[in-house]
Image (cartoon, helix red, strand yellow):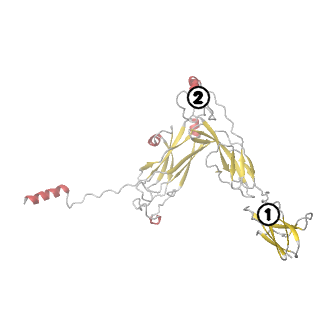
Amino acid sequence: MKPAVAVGLLACMIAGCGKKGPPLPPLVKLPVAPTNLTAERRASMVDLSLTVPAANTDGTRPANVSRVEIYALTAPASTPDAVVLKQGARIASIQVKTPRDPNQTVEPDDPDTDIEQPEGPGLDQGATAHVLEDLTALAQTGAIQRAPRSAGTEPVEGPLVGPPLAAPARQYLAVGVNQRGRRGPLSKHVGVPLIVPPARGPQPSVSYDESAITVAWGSAPSSATPPPPADDAALLPSRELAITPIEIAYNVYDVPDSSTGGAATRLTNAPVRDARFVDQRLAWGAERCYAVRIVEIVDALPIEGDIGPARCVTPVDTFPPAAPKKPTAIARIGAIDILWDPNEEKDLAGYLVLRREGPEAPFTRLTPEPIDRTNFSDLVPQGFRAIYAIEAVDKAGNVSAMSPPTDEESAR
């Protein structure tokens, strides 16, 4: 054998020329982290919301996800996500529709029509999931504490001893799990304060005008601070002076009619500091019921108290339109034409044209029913003089004050 051939054969043996190895296993796809995780505490309940994964970490769809798990841990906000997962308790497992073959996916730029739809029980991928956690059991263990101060950002006299004490908090995170039981990336954790919730909300007063409904209520009272335990007596000065301040705010809810059922809907996008809320959804004859929850904000985390008693109102339109403006009379042979500026009310039904034939004579209506235009021709004899005014009428039948008068004499 020639040396060159021998060298070639040796290299081929080393490299395994012409010989296929065992097939590589398919890449195991993992769902992306659940998104839009929020936690809102109302009294003893925490309402958790999230968006179910609809894609994999490589961008392909549908997601290889069979369930979404939620974990909770009583810990500071600075706790790493991995610690919340490892040390926390799994409080919910949300079943999700899964793909028949997790490897049959489409690329991020492919149309949705190319996706083989997931099947089976559970939520759709991309849907919003809601989970409630009842904190009653935590309260029984003493995990929920009374806030050392119930209100205020008012200054405290004297030096602070150490950094502000953080209120105890409950941290939550979510993670998607694929069909093989492998977890995808973790969501960012969110928290709620574990303090005794504020008092029940006050009953509001409700008033309205022609443009909006105003809901108002009294400010929340400050609850008294309970005496400290005996073994904390030595820490009392620093504990009182270094506690995280608590701000008082409010959320306003639209409460459905008791006969129709349904849940209350929050109207405030964020808690309001003023004891007043203006609802622009004015509809004449439609009953609206409002209730208020007191919100305490500690370490930037809100906690709501129980919802207060509702107050209802059915707005009735008793507000007349504005008086029409700039009436003008133009004479021609056998007629006087009257023009005026249009009103801007959305519920305007039309206009009434009035005439009187002398300064002391009463006005009489030339149009028994409202007209929907801003002009009118009064057919009169030649040389006839009269004074004209206009009234606006809305759909509820409210009549405006008269416009300024205008007078004219028809041409001869």
Depth order, front residue of 192/118 = 192
Q: Image point 92% across, 63% down: which residue?
A: 360
User: Would you call the spot at circle 1 few (<14 residues within 10 Å), some (14-19), or many (20 or more)?
Assistant: many
**Quadrant of the frame with the C terminus:** bottom right
Q: Image point 88% across, 74% down: which residue?
A: 383
Q: Which mark is residue 52?
A: none
Residue 28 placement, left or right of 18? right
Judging from the image, what secondary structure is the residue with disc 2 in?
A: helix
Q: Residue furthest left?
A: 1
Residue 334 in the image: state x and y as whole percent: 85, 77
Badge 1 or badge 2: first in the primary sequence: 2
Residue 377 placement, left or right of 230? right
Depth order, front residue of 162/149 = 162
Q: Amino acid at mark 2?
A: Leu
Please, is residue 314 above or below residue 89 in the view?
A: below
- The residue tagged 1 is 392
- The residue tagged 2 is 241
Depth order, front residue of 231/296 = 296
Q: Image point 45% across, 59% down: which residue?
A: 62
User: Would you call the spot at circle 2 few (<14 residues within 10 Å), some (14-19), or many (20 or more)?
Assistant: many
